[in-house]
Every structure is written in structure tokens, then in C-alpha cells.
Image: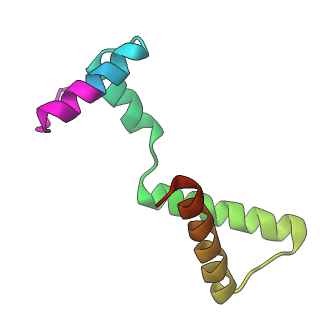
Amino acid sequence: MSDANVRIPEEAKDRLAAIAASEGLSLRAYLARLAETLLTPQERAERAERARAALEEWSGYAPTAAEERDLDSELDRRLAHVTGR
């Protein structure tokens, strides 16, 4: 596997290196693990669709697009409340 160079602010590199060290990893190993565990937007959408289909099959619940938007807004509101945003 070849390496790649990524330019980021020194403060960001230092922070990531400290996080990596606290987990007993090098910065290189930490970033590789991070890249392997995070989902791309497409992967998240596919996972959400599978979850929606499973919920519908299990319970018969099939919200409309408008209901999904309302539920998303409510979730966003609650998350903003608990995170102080």
C-alpha cells in the first residue's frame, strides 16, 4: 500500500496525534482505522434504506415523505437541544 500526503493545519495534526497516542496508535494507524470505520454518504443512505425496509417489514410502518421530514425535523430539534446548538 502506498502512502499519501495530506496537508492539514499543524494544530489539527497535533490533536489527531494526541488522540491516536491515547489509543496506543500511531497517527498513520489511527487515520487508517478512521477511514475504514466511517461511512460514506452513499453507504449511510444505503444503510438507512435497509433499516427503513426492515422496519416496514417488521411493523408495517411506512411513513410518507412528509412524515419523514417532520420526524427528521423533530430529531434535529431534540439533538440541538441536548447539544446546545
Q: Residue at x 32, y 29 (%)?
A: 31
Q: Residue 22's quadrant in the figure?
A: top left
Most extreme residue toward the front is 84
Q: Is 20 drawn above or below residue 45 in the view shown?
A: above
Q: Residue 47's quadrant in the figure?
A: bottom right
Q: Is 67 drawn above or below residue 33 in the view shown?
A: below
- Left or right position of 5 against 20: left
Q: Residue at x 69, y 60 (%)?
A: 51
Residue 40, horizontal then vertical, whole percent: 42, 53
- Which of 50/27 is in front? 27
Residue 6, horizontal then vertical, whole percent: 14, 37
- Left or right position of 47 against 84: right
> Which residue range is magenta in the image?
1-15
Whether residue 14 is in magenta: the answer is yes
Q: Main secondary structure of the magenta part?
A: loop
Question: Is residue 1 at all visible to an observer of this figure?
Answer: no
Whether residue 8 is in magenta: the answer is yes
Residue 80, horizontal then vertical, whole percent: 53, 63
Give the quadrant of the N terminus. top left
Q: Residue 64's quadrant in the figure?
A: bottom right
- Left or right position of 20 against 75: left
Residue 77, horizontal then vertical, whole percent: 58, 70
